[in-house]
Amino acid sequence: MDKQNIVKKILEQFEQISDTKNIKDIAYSFYVDKKEFLLFPPRLDFPESKVSLFINVKHVGFIPHIFFYDYTKKEFDFLPDEAYAPLCLYEAYDYISSLFSYEDKIYDAIRRLLKLLFMSPVDKEREFQKEFSVYWHNMATEKMTVDVFLHQAKSFSKLKIYRHGKNMRLVEDGITLNDLLSQDVRIWEEDVGDDAYLIPISDKRNIIPPYRKNPWSIKNIQHILADVAIDHISPDIYKKLKRITSSKRNIWFVFSMHVQEIDILFTVKIRCGNQKHENLLNEIMHAAEQIKTFRTRRMDYLFLNRIVGNEQKLYGKKILLVGCGSLGSYVASELVKNGCISLTVYDSDYLSIENTMRWAGNPALVGGYKVDYIKKLLENFHPEINVTAFHKKLDKKILCDMIKEFSLIIFTIGSSDSQLAFNRALKMNHCNIPVIYTWLEAGGRYSHILAVDYQSKGCYQCLFTDENGKMINNRAIHMSETLNDSYVDSIIRNGCGGTRAAYGTTILLRTTAVLLDTLQQIYSNYGIQHKLTTITPLAVEYPDNLIPMKGCQCCGL
């Protein structure tokens, strides 16, 4: 049986379908519930292809999952003299088209369509709300996108308004952004001519996004704020709106609504008349003259991390990173993607062109200090990130003076002498925060992470102590003598004792990934599970016989 007859036969099996027509052996027209649809069958020569379904734009109504663009004869000359909008019937995560036969794809598409058309009003409402943001953005009356920065989305809050050209931000009080100024020149100006508020919606019943033939009006806002049948906002927020007075004609509302474990946002601007009322609620209910709807993009750091699944255990922690070489650059870049927005970095080196080949980021600031580049790179990543950069070596006195300022210290320096000195200083000053020592072995094949809690047994110097309490070379070293000879031959010497070891980025990626796992353990209920971690090309090992070491002259075991 040819494909035209297959499609026709399948459509005729559904009693809800009528008036089936073949359109030039390309598409099929049919009616369901007095609504016209077009079906484009899958391609036989492409197993991954799907059925495409379109609805006549004249018949669009209270039906979810309809796209916001149309097809006409201008795009496809074989179409009737009508406009057709595509329907979205599939979610990529739950449908693998290649697994279905040609016939099964058509059966499945029709069943999905009928299920969509004959949903209960409550189910349709739920489907509309799943894609509320999509509908809102496509139906927004204004082209400008409003960026919103929040601490939370559950409580009523007044927002600050910032403008930069045609760009706009609404920012909850207490959030600090690093890009309001550039070289002491204000880039984002605070707008005090309007008022803005965050309004959480506690009951989302009967709140449908704008869709074709159903744009929002002022009545939709009044319905949210003071519906007689449903308390869409809490009684507490309702009372606050009745206590607030505003002399501004333009009132901005950012509404938050919890849908599928995410707080979605949508923004409106209400213009009120000149005659002022005794409170904000009455102003909206009796003096609102115009509504504009805006595309809304939630931009606060914690929310962005949460929706992509990044760890957030470092949020609110102040971290000191000592060393911004190749490993330090990777560590710094990943810290700010895993909750850290307050980072202090120390390094005295300049960034050379050779450094950039194994650095995180691009070499835009070759010749400048490494820490200055790290600061610019990370603060450009997100405006809530604050990096304090010191282009000098950290000494023991400064370190001990500033311990109380931080929640965590990470060393990514190659000098064992420096790390031993810092280790002794931290132990003597009764450091009470986690400290991480991270280093690469000389050959560039192995790396190590040591997590130290100075309130318990064990420290960095334990690795350099033998069973008699004498100082020896680091006992964690994995590299064999053969590899060591090969490494010595590959050293690049640059004068006066300076060297650069040849190793690639693979070891940097491995070490950084394991470091992130270590930090997650420290800030979970597990605490420090493994003091010493060794990362090899083939495995991650946790030797437990190297630390603590009896006879260590630093921790006094």
Image (cartoon, rainbow, N blue to C red):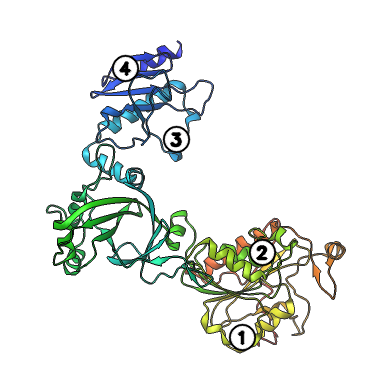
SS category of the residue bearing label 2: loop
Q: Measured along the vertical axis of the image, is residue 176 above or below residue 116?
A: below
Q: Residue at x 31, y 46 (%)?
A: 141
Residue 459 locus on image (x, y percent): 64, 80
Q: Which is more foreground, mark 3 or mark 1?
A: 1
Return the residue nearer the eye: 434 or 328. 328
In this orientation, does residue 124 appear?
yes
Q: Measured along the vertical axis of the image, is residue 223 above or below residue 353?
A: above
Return the residue nearer the eye: 518 or 286. 286
In this orientation, does residue 517 appear?
no
Q: Are marks 3 and 1 in contact (CB under 8 Å)?
A: no
Which quadrant, please, contains the C terminus?
A: bottom right
Task: Please give left or right for residue 2 compared with residue 411 in the image.
Answer: left
CA separation in Å, label 4 and label 2: 68 Å
Residue 507 locus on image (x, y percent): 70, 59
The residue wearing badge 4 is: 13
The residue wearing badge 1 is: 398
The residue wearing badge 3 is: 95
Q: Residue 388's quadrant in the figure? A: bottom right
Q: Residue 134's quadrant in the figure? A: top left
The residue wearing badge 2 is: 365
Q: Are marks 2 and 1 in contact (CB under 8 Å)?
A: no
Mark closest to the chain's N terminus, 4 or 2: 4
| Residue 167: image tag | none
Q: Residue 389's quadrant in the figure? A: bottom right
